[in-house]
Image (cartoon, rainbow, N blue to C red):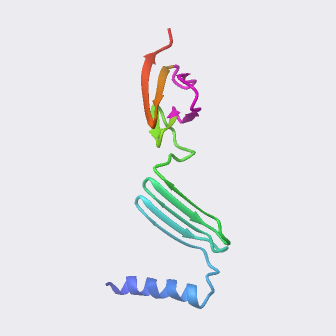
Amino acid sequence: MEKSQLCLFALVGFLFIGGGAQAQISVTTPGQDVRIGKDGSVNARSDGAASTSSRGNEASVTVGGISEDADVEGVTVINGRVAIDGKDVPPNVTRYKSPKSGKVYLIQRKGGSVSVSDAGDGK
């Protein structure tokens, strides 16, 4: 292990032990981000997954989700949930026209399976 890495680990250890974790710490690498806030909250993100915890007993984990600010075009099906052009489609809908692209989609649900087909431009 390099000397600079040892110094970094010593500094982080000092902040947690000596400083009572009062500082905000952030580590970012390509595809990953970990942040420890002044309030003790922890946010960890990686490609396709996110985890958040805060003081008390609140925590959340997202795996295979789509970020709210993502610019999505087309059909996405995750765990039986259908989204078209980034908008969730209610489970009872069988025909959906995308306001973004104008395309019409036919949605068939059978048990836990979902099938989505392109019906064209709706004409």
The span shown in magenta is 83-102
Q: x, y percentage for residue 5? A: 39, 82
Q: x, y percentage for residue 64? A: 45, 49
The extreme left residue here reads: 1
Q: Quadrant of the N terminus?
A: bottom left
Q: x, y percentage for residue 92? A: 58, 28
The extreme front residue here reads: 111
Q: Is residue 99 found inside the magenta-colored segment of the image?
A: yes
Q: Is residue 77 found inside the magenta-colored segment of the image?
A: no
Q: x, y percentage for residue 54? A: 64, 68
Name the residue: 51% across, 87% down: 13
* Horizontal relation, residue 6 to residue 88: left or right: left
Quarter of the image where one finds residue 119 = top left
* Horizontal relation, residue 89 to residue 3: left or right: right
When the figure is inspected, residue 26 is found, relative to residue 16, above or below; the finding is above
* Horizontal relation, residue 2 to residue 66: left or right: left
Along the line of sight, the residue nearer the viewer: 38 or 2: 38
Magenta residues: mostly which secondary structure?
Answer: loop
Name the residue: 47% across, 43% down: 79
Name the residue: 45% across, 37% down: 112
When the figure is inspected, residue 104 is found, relative to residue 44, above or below; the finding is above
Along the line of sight, the residue nearer the viewer: 91 or 88: 91
Along the line of sight, the residue nearer the viewer: 95 or 122: 95
Quarter of the image where one finds residue 116 = top left
Along the line of sight, the residue nearer the viewer: 55 or 29: 55
